[in-house]
Image (cartoon, rainbow, N blue to C red):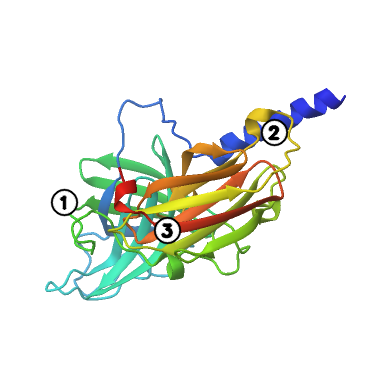
Amino acid sequence: MKKIKQILLVLAIVIGASMSLPSCGGDDNGTDVIILDGLWEITDIISEEEEPATEDNEPGDDTTAGDGDAGAGSPPAKTEGNSQAEIIDDFGYIRFDLNTYAYFTVEGQTITTHSAGTYILSGKTLTLKEAGSADQAVVAMIDLKGNQLIMEMVFEDGSQTWHAQKMANDPFLDNGGDGTEYIDFENEVHKSDSVPGSLWNPDVIGLNQTISGTLDTLISLEAYKAEQFYYLKVDSAKTYQLTVNVFDPVYHLPAEFVEYVQVWISHKPFENNYKAEDTRIKSGTETFYNLQSPTGYLYIRLFSYQNEIDFELTLTEQEEQEQD
């Protein structure tokens, strides 16, 4: 009976680990590959109770989409007028990165982000999950023809059809030409009402500061997963190194191959952006080199299958001779 329990625990750990990692699989049902990366201008939004504008509409009529009640994450109502001298769009823009998205509107020099998070594209099914909304997602069926994108969006209180056009460049990136948008993750994405030290509410640390802690399942609220999240703002032009010390852990796991602490690094706060370091720590000290962040934020996740492991970590600027 004891062996059966151990086998079941190993299976739970393996299954849990596979669920915690981002999927790299694709959709094999179609021959066309849809690539969303880039900036899309929302040219029209039609609610389910509305009909598209026709040539019979008078110039002064305001029957365009966006009026009335909007679903969660949907855009504000369209306003009259559109200045040709400024980059302004009543419906806004949606930017897709490798696995993240941001929907925002622009007025003059002001950019307002209405929704940001991660997305999954499977065939023609697009799932948007807003940061901090673990139980809510927006699902859309999409159709891409050239640079024209149609998204049949399903919100909590209704459906909308979004029409978008791919832009040749992204005029809203203020990044010095390195292709990375600056986002104030600390104020726009972090959730102060989440569990301290968790994915959406990581603990802030300082450079050259030694942090002591204990890996605990109370952070993840899952019995097989002990973890802790940290972050700090860094200089995107500099390189850093992280030293982690694991103090004499006592493992009570059914198999030796799961007895370790692993470091995950990200420059964004979204789960799918974290990448695991190859070196795992069973006990003792390891240093991880060549850590950089194009966003100005560096995120650190410590993970283990074993609960109650004491550790210390220190992040320092990397010396030039150690950058090779």
Percent coordinates x, y for residue 126 in the rendering: 42, 44
Mark 1 lies on a secondary structure that is loop
**Type of residue at label 1?**
Ala
Find disc 1 in the rendering and name its residue.
Answer: 168
Marks 2 and 3, how far apart at CA: 37 Å
Mark 1 or 3 closer to N-term? 1
Crowdedness near tag 1: few (<14), some (14–19) or many (≥20) residues, C-alpha within 10 Å: few
Question: In the displayed structure, does residue 132 sit left or right of residue 117?
Answer: right
Mark 3 lies on a secondary structure that is strand
Find disc 2 in the rendering and name its residue.
Answer: 12
Marks 1 and 2, how far apart at CA: 47 Å
**Type of residue at label 3?**
Thr
Crowdedness near tag 2: few (<14), some (14–19) or many (≥20) residues, C-alpha within 10 Å: some
Q: Quadrant of residue 33?
A: top left
* Res 50 seen here: no
Percent coordinates x, y for residue 42 in the rendering: 28, 58
Q: Quadrant of residue 59?
A: bottom left
**Type of residue at label 2?**
Ala
- Which residue is farthest left? 85
Find disc 3 in the rendering and name its residue.
Answer: 316
* Res 54 seen here: yes
| Image quarter (top left, top right, bottom left or bottom right) of the C terminus | top left
- Which residue is farthest right? 1
- Residue at position x 35%, y 55% in the image: 293
- Residue at position x 23%, y 59% in the image: 54
